[in-house]
Image (cartoon, grey):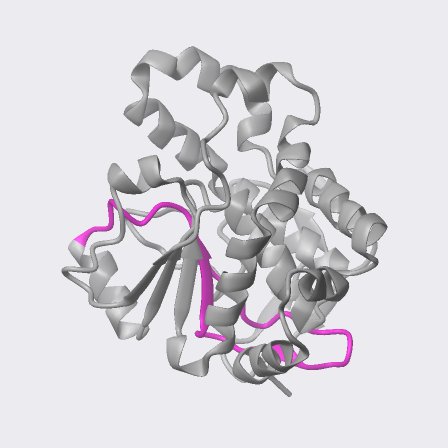
Amino acid sequence: MKISLRRHRSVTGDSPPVTKVICVTISPCPFPTGRHLPLEGAVNFRDIGGYETADGAHVRWGVIYRADGLSELESRDLELLQERGIATVIDLRTSFERENGAFPVETVPVSFHHLPLMETVPDFESFRTVPGFLSSTYVDMVEGAGGQIAQAIEIMADASNIPLVYHCAVGKDRTGVLTAILLGILGVPHETIVADYALSTLAMDKVRDRLIARYPEAEEQIREAKELLSAEPKNMEFLLTTIEQQWGSIEAYAHHLGISAETCTALRSALLEA
């Protein structure tokens, strides 16, 4: 499947160099070089460094990561995260999900924050039967979980909290919404935000297999709920369009949440480089 998003440009950072993919080809190939961390216990853990902003700056490598669930990490995974210097973990999952497994702070000491973007996880049937359910859920998050989103941005803006990883269960939806707000505040163009979101498609086969292993009684519903494991550009495009329609821009949305101009400046200082 090919996801065409108008143009293709190269992005370079100090280290490592990568390509910013604006025309994404989804196939059984690896993630873009340097972006994906090959962990055993997490399949959608990736660096969002290297992306270029509208004014020519770049998101720094090795300081901000997005991920799927972090409760089943192997010992080597934890060693790798310690080597990366991870200082902070933000868990965007529900309280129920957290109670059933969370990042092992007793093994790897980090600053841990639980900021759920949903009160409950929708059932598999909703994804199968309700058209557009996924994209409408994203809008529900920005409308109903603004306080948690603002807290997450405040945490990221404090340079003492990085390197940092934020995650949900799959690393696509709640994590994708927060990534969109973060990159938007940093000044990364919408087309790049959409392309980064679409990269989650590369992990969805493994995510599906893990869901089935965890919920074998729901295997049929999981296989039929194709939207649940989709990262089609239209989902993120819908969210970005809705934010523009309701607030004018992501930066204006951030202001609506009470995120100050000083915090936005600190965020850019912590996460961007020339």
Q: Residue 210: x and y, percent?
A: 34, 31
Which residue is pictured at 31% across the width and 49% down the height? 70
Q: Is residue 152 left or right of residue 238?
A: left
Q: Give, as a single range, the part of the protein colored magenta.
A: 46-74
Residue 262's place in the image compared with 102, above or below, is below
Which residue is pictured at 64% across the width and 59% down the height? 181
Which residue is pictured at 73% across the width and 66% down the height? 251
Which residue is pictured at 24% across the width and 50% down the height? 73
Asked whether residue 12 appears in the rendered view, the answer is: no
Residue 229's place in the image compared with 268, above or below, is above
Residue 232's place in the image compared with 56, above or below, is above
**Residue 27: within the magenta?**
no
Asked whether residue 56 appears in the rendered view, the answer is: yes
Which image quarter: residue 253?
bottom right
Q: Residue 175: x and y, percent?
A: 51, 50
Q: The C terminus appears in which quarter of the rendering?
A: bottom right
Q: The N terminus appears in which quarter of the rendering?
A: top right
Which image quarter: residue 212?
top left
Residue nearest the observer in this picture, 263 or 216: 263
Q: Residue 216: x and y, percent?
A: 31, 17
